[in-house]
Image (tube, rainbow, N blue to C red):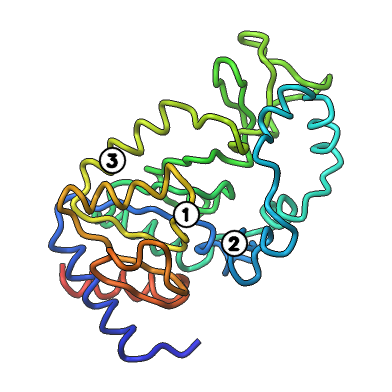
Amino acid sequence: MALGEDVFQAIRDAAVTIVDSGYVTCLTGAGISVESGIRPFRGPGGLWTEKGEPSMDGYQRFLRDPVSYWERRMRNESEFGISIMGANPNPGHVALAELEKMGVLRTLITQNIDNLHLAAGSRNVLEIHGNSRHLRCVDCHTKWRNEDFRVEETPPTCPECGGVVKSDTVMFGEPIPGPVLNRCFEEASRSDCMIVAGTSATVTPAASLPAMVKRNGGSLTEFNIRRSEISYICDVNVFAPSGESLPMLVEEIKKLT
């Protein structure tokens, strides 16, 4: 899409805000991966907008019947899962990885399970909802890459403690693993600036992180295709595709440093 002068100015303002900050973090959501061919969940074109939101007791259903979960998983019929496996990072992911390499971005917190930030080169990534390319024991939280864990029975069990193994992705009704959640809150509490990219900011606890930064006197710079639930508290709003705007942000920051 053609970007207007108001968008260019907002990107310049965001660059100044970020450069003037001492500890910059980022929160990303499904919107940043749309340009990689992965549908968002909510809003226009959203998977759940079209098909309805999944059951809110998904984790409890898994615990009651893990065999059925694994039978469905091994059939590999999920439209969302198939799109993730074939996706590649887009320029928005690459731009955030570059900001980390430049020493500008300290930590990236993502709600996405698609592994694209890591594939783009980001290293200090907190995946608050897990990673679809990993499996996890529900008891001891040991993780394995999908290809490194041999499923010989359903449900598979953990070789460390005997607990049931599931995808690392966090289901509705499933507690977010404590170590990851604690790190997310620690990073938000340190931040005097947070970049919020591609998220509607409606799902807690991730949605509470920008508010924490703001309450602590920090700044918020938003990169979204449209207004979100937190647009009104953001210091700078860049309404444009993140695959276009974030690379431009990197170039503006380079001019200032």
Q: Where is residue 251 in the image (x, y as percent from the top left)?
A: 29, 74
Alpha carbon separation for disc pair 1 and 3: 20 Å
Q: Residue at x 72, y 50 (%)?
A: 81
Residue 75 shown left or right of residue 122 in the figure: right
The mark lying in front, picked from 1 and 3, is: 1
CB under 8 Å between callouts 2 and 1?
yes
The mark lying in front, picked from 2 and 3, is: 2
Q: Position of residue 117 (x, y in %)?
A: 48, 52
User: Where 126 sits versus 103, above or below?
Assistant: above
Alpha carbon separation for disc pair 2 and 1: 10 Å
Q: What element carries label 3?
A: helix
Q: What residue type is labelled 1?
A: Thr
Q: In which quarter of the image is residue 245?
A: bottom left
Q: Position of residue 60 (x, y in %)?
A: 68, 27
Q: Which label is found at residue 182?
A: none
Q: Which residue is drawn at 43% across and 26% down?
A: 178
Residue 136 shown left or right of residue 27 in the figure: right
Q: What residue type is labelled 3?
A: Glu
Q: Is mark 2 on a helix, strand or loop?
A: loop
Task: List the residue tagged with mark 1.
Answer: 202
Task: List the residue tagged with mark 2.
Answer: 42
Alpha carbon separation for disc pair 2 and 3: 27 Å
CB under 8 Å between callouts 1 and 3?
no
Q: What element carries label 1?
A: loop
Q: Which label is found at residue 187?
A: 3
Q: Which residue is drawn at 45% across and 49% down?
A: 110
